[in-house]
Amino acid sequence: MPLGLEAGAVTALPPRERRLVPRNLSGRPRPLWTLTGPILPAGGLWSTCRTLSQVVTGLLVDRRLGPPAPTWQHGSSITWHNGATRGSSVIAAAHDDGRWIVLHRLGAGDATDDLARKTLLAAPAPRGGA
């Protein structure tokens, strides 16, 4: 596979014991927000943060498949994609100099993007970066 992912690394429904899910005030898991059919890629795919990190570095840092697709958001020096589903949020971003971040949060989704941006910009640039 072009990004070095193992078969099954991304799935529509992982085994229950491998799911990281938000919990309600009493500590019980909240019902999953599920998507199926043609809208599955809009939030219905599951992976580990390690797998998502491989995707981010392969697509945005190493550019193994060429320039990022138009669906990625582009700033002056940062490329990112974010999303949220019922109590969970994630952002994957890379700076032109090679710094990158994947941030997944349960709850407080409105602050995820800002936290990722601050963390990414505070990180030292990798050696050999621009």
Image (tube, rainbow, N blue to C red):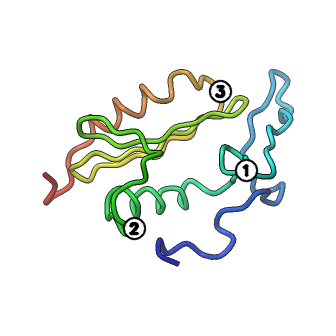
Q: Is residue 60 left or right of residue 102?
A: left
The answer for how far apart the CA atoms under marks 2 and 1 are is 22 Å
Label 1 sits on residue: 40
Residue 122 lies in quadrant: top left
Q: Residues within 10 Å of mark 3 (few under 14, many from 20)?
A: some
Q: Position of residue 54 (x, y in %)?
A: 47, 63
The reply, left or right, for residue 39 in relation to residue 90 is right
Residue at 40% in and 46% down:
101
Residue at image coords 58%, 36%: 83
For badge 1, the amino acid type reads Leu
Mark carried by residue 80: none
Which mark is first along the chain, 2 or 3?
2
In the visual, does 126 lie left or right of 92? left
The amino acid type of the residue labelled 2 equals: Leu
- Report which residue position mark 3 lands on: 107
Measure how far apart labels 3 and 2 are at the Cα level: 33 Å
The residue that disc 2 covers is 65
Where does the image place residue 60, in percent across and percent down from the top left? 36, 55
**Mark 3: amino acid:** Gly
Whether pointer 3 and pointer 2 mark residues with C-beta atoms closer than 8 Å, the reply is: no
Q: Callout 2: 10 Å neighbours few (<14), some, many (20+)?
A: few
Q: Residue at x 56, y 39 (%)?
A: 90
The 10 Å Cα crowd at callout 1, few under 14, some 14 to 19, many 20 or more, is: few
Q: Quadrant of residue 23?
A: top right
- The secondary structure type at the circle numbered 2 is loop
User: In what element is the residue under mark 3?
Assistant: loop
User: Looking at the image, is mark 1 or mark 3 nearer the viewer?
Assistant: 1
Q: CA distance from mark 1 to mark 3?
A: 22 Å
Q: Nearer the viewer, residue 118 or 91?
A: 91
Would you say the residues marked 1 and 3 are in contact, meaning their CB atoms lie under 8 Å apart?
Answer: no
The image position of residue 2, as x and y in percent, is: 47, 75
Secondary structure found at label 1 = helix
